[in-house]
Each structure stands twice: as structure tokens, then as C-alpha cells.
Amino acid sequence: MHSYERFLSLLEDAFNSEEQAEVRCINIEEPMCEALGQFTAYLRSHPKDTNGFWMSTSRSVASCHRPLFTMLTRFRLLESVTAGLRDNRFNLASPPSGITISVNSNTISFPGSFSGAYVNTAAGSWQRNLSGIQLWVFVPEDAVNPSNFAGLANGENDWTPLGKQRLVVLEENDVLFVPPGLRLVQAWHTPVTCLTEQGLLWDDLSVLPILESMLVGHEHQPTHEGRNAQQLSRMISNLDCLIREQPDRFRKCMARDEFLVRFRAATQSWLETSSNGGKPR
């Protein structure tokens, strides 16, 4: 049902549209923006010239079943704060597909593709392997000292995980969930052609860890994270409105006044850091 060939057929339906896809290659530092239909035609006509490539759509094309827990109200927060934004694509927790991704999207990755290392910061994520195999390598923040963590975060294609890495093998139908606010450096390897669907999410009960992780992301990867600073600021503004109206929804067992004080401090720190090129004032 979710085979590579079936997915290409779905992509071909968009041949005459203006929809764009993000394409990356292990030998190209910056992602390329390509017309979805044209790149699909390239895949059809050059089936043996795809090694090292991966392509991400700006929406879910396969429309597979998202994990049931993501339908819970507490995990719909990201959809709420992005509702109404002109462009709901952002870079909260760079997925294996690269820099720009929507709340839900698909990725085709080909043998030899490598995401480069990046920090999982402000968003949780889920990924369902529809076909193929992917290797997820990660280093938790608490496994290395702060200076080494910063070095790993900026290693990108040249990262050396210092023997602290952990490996997860994702096979067909496996689902990976990375909770919001969990800080780690991660990278993806693809040994065979792989089709995935993935999504980003926030958790009502993890607002403070999410904001604190956003700050870590800007300190360690200011250029990488700064591409979306304006949109993230608008999302934080929307979150602020929700919290002012419904503080009890987000504070868990924390006293309301303490929660609000910590929330204001976290948002102020992030706004100051993001406007200062990732450097705390």
C-alpha cells in the first residue's frame, strides 16, 4: 500500500502543480528546492542515479495513519499555535529530510543518504517507516560534557560521536517517537531506499522544557535555527495567548504563579537570544 512505486504515482499527480519539494544530497551542503513533479520525473527517468539523495515533501502525500497518541488533545498544541500562519513550515526539530518541513510530511531517502548531525530541540517528533530501513544514531545531552555537545551539534556531515552514540534500527511499520523537550544530537543513515511519514508535535505538559530546548538550539546552532526565528516568534506569541487564557492546562502540578514566572523568563530569554544571533545577552 505504501510502496515506493505507489508513492511515486501519488507524486506524479502533482506534476503540473507549483508544489515544491526539498532535495538534499550527501555531496551538497545546502538543500535544493525543486518542483515536485519535475523531481518525480527525474526519479522515473534516472532510477540508478539516486544514491545519496533524499527528498522531503511539504505535506503528507501518503496520508498514512498517524500514531493514535498524537490525536490526543495534549499533543495537538503545535497545530494550534501554527494555525493561521501563512506558511506553517518550520524547523523546530530538523528531521532526516532536511531543513524545511511541515507538521506532517513524507520523505524518500535513497541508499547512502545521510542527514548530517543536528540538535533535536524544540519539537517532539514521530516517524513511521512505510518501507525500507533507516538507522537512527543519537547522542543524549547528558552523555557528553557541554563543550563536546556543542561540537557534536555543529558537526553536520563531519560529526564524530565520540563513542557515545546509540543506534536504533527502524524497519518497515516501525514507529519512532522522540518526546518534546528531549535534548540530543542525532543523525540518520539510509542503507536501502526508504519511504517514511513523519510529524512534529508539542505537548501541553512540556511547555517549559520545549522553550528551554529552543534556547539550547539557538545557542548551539544559531545559523541553522535562525532561519525560522521570525515564525517561531509568532508561534510563541500564539502560545502566550493560550497560556494567558488557560494556564491550568499547561502548568501540571506547578503553582500557577511559579509556572507563569518561569514561562515569561523562558520566552524572554529565547526572544533575546534569537535576536542576538544565538548569543545570550
Image: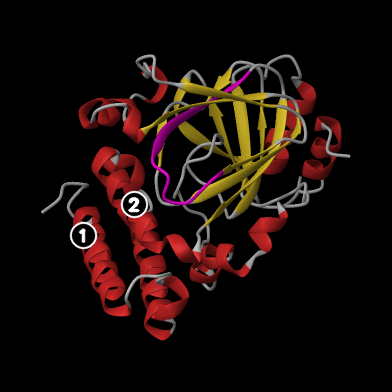
Q: CA distance from mark 1 to mark 2?
A: 10 Å
Q: Residue at x 72, y 23 (%)?
A: 193
Please say whether residue 71 is one of the residues in the magenta stretch: no
Q: Amino acid at mark 2?
A: Met
Number of other residues with Cα within 10 Å of mark 1, as a class: few under 14, some 14 to 19, many 20 or more:
some
| Residue that carries the numbered disc 2 in the rendered image | 214
Task: List x then y, in percent, for residue 116.
Answer: 45, 26
Quarter of the N terminus within the rendering: top right
Number of other residues with Cα within 10 Å of mark 2, as a class: few under 14, some 14 to 19, many 20 or more:
many
| Helix, strand or loop under label 2 | helix
| Left or right: where 211 falls relative to 252 | left
Q: Which residues are magenta?
A: 178-190
Q: Within the image, what quadrant is residue 220 found in?
A: top left
* Name of the residue lying farthest toward the right: 1
Q: Within the image, what quadrant is residue 170 found in?
A: top right
Viewer-nearest residue: 82 or 10:
82
| Residue that carries the numbered disc 1 in the rendered image | 269
Q: Residue at x 50, y 46 (%)?
A: 100
Q: Amino acid at mark 1?
A: Ser
Task: List x then y, in percent, for residue 70.
Answer: 64, 58
